[in-house]
Amino acid sequence: MDACVLALGGSLLTDDSTVFGDWIRGVARILEPRSPPMHPTVVVVGGGVSARKGISMVINSTDNPLAHDRVGISATRLNATIIRECLSAYGIIVAERLPSSASEAVEISSNGVVVMGGTHPGHTTDYVAIEVASKFSAGNCIIATNVSHVYSSDPKVDPDAMPMEMVDHETLRQLVGEPGDHQAGGRSVVDPVGAALAREKKIELSILDGKDLVALESAIIGNKFRGTRVTNN
Ligand code: UTP
């Protein structure tokens, strides 16, 4: 059984319907050969703009971080519904419901490609994907985001920031920070809580730009891809 767990960053859901339509059709084509139950596949979708907008709307009314996270989770589930409906329209057999926990995702994965959003407050959908990978005892989790690589420092502030093809978990920890650094709507390349879980469970990460369908397909089939491999050592 070769489980594939894929986190799709919410920023990949652009509201340009032509760009989005072309992209999701490409994702469906890549997922087509992954028919369950032999090839369980779970796609965990982030909240993107909807999550950030929702969180910024409640922030003046409540400083309860759980409330912020719950709004973020609702946005991820809306985005997951969008992705699920599109994949189904392009002929992918999808599981009949959006699971609300990593265990439920594994349970229903023999029914079709599972598409889901967030689960509980305190982390992002990167963590959820890594948790699902851990429940499958998968050695790898793909994080498809809006940047092509992990950089040696923040490229927005450091002109000398270098894209890295391979880093170990310890280096990733130094770059993204400690699990306590989780913040609703935070923007690090991988959620520090997820990075810590991957480090603990010895799950390698394939981090890539989700718009780059060649890289995404290569990572899914286990080939070399354009992006960063986070290794156990
Ligand atoms: P995302 O997974 O979308 O985080 O969750 P993100 O870092 O903004 O990722 P991209 O940009 O979409 O890829 C959005 C927010 O929803 C809450 C958190 O507040 C998170 O920052 N959330 C999400 C949870 O609390 N639990 C979850 O399981 C998922």
Image (spheres, grey):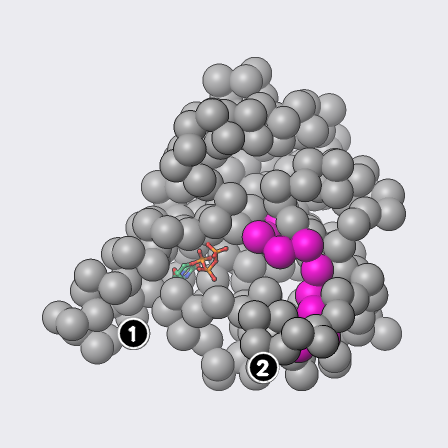
Position above or below: 60 against 110: below
Residue 123 appears left or right of 228: left
Q: Position of residue 165 (x, y in %)?
A: 82, 62
Q: What residue is at 40 percent from the left and 74 percent from the top?
A: 183
Q: Residues within 10 Å of mark 1 (few under 14, many from 20)?
A: some
Question: Foreground: 68 or 198?
Answer: 68
Where is the N terminus found, in terms of image quarters? top right
**How many residues crowd around disc 2 within 10 Å: few (fewer than 14), some, or many (20 or more)?**
some
Residue 48 drawn at (x, y percent) = 42, 52
Give residue 39's quadrant in the image: top right
Three-letter code for the amino acid on which mark 2 is drawn = Gly
Residue 63 is left or right of residue 84, and the answer is left
| Residue topped by disc 1 | 65
In the depicted structure, whether residue 149 falls above or below residue 172: above
Query: Residue 200 appears in which quarter of the rendering?
Result: bottom right
The residue shown at (48%, 17%) is 89
Which label number is shown at residue 141?
Answer: none
Instruction: Give the residue at mark 2.
Output: 177
Mark 2: secondary structure: loop
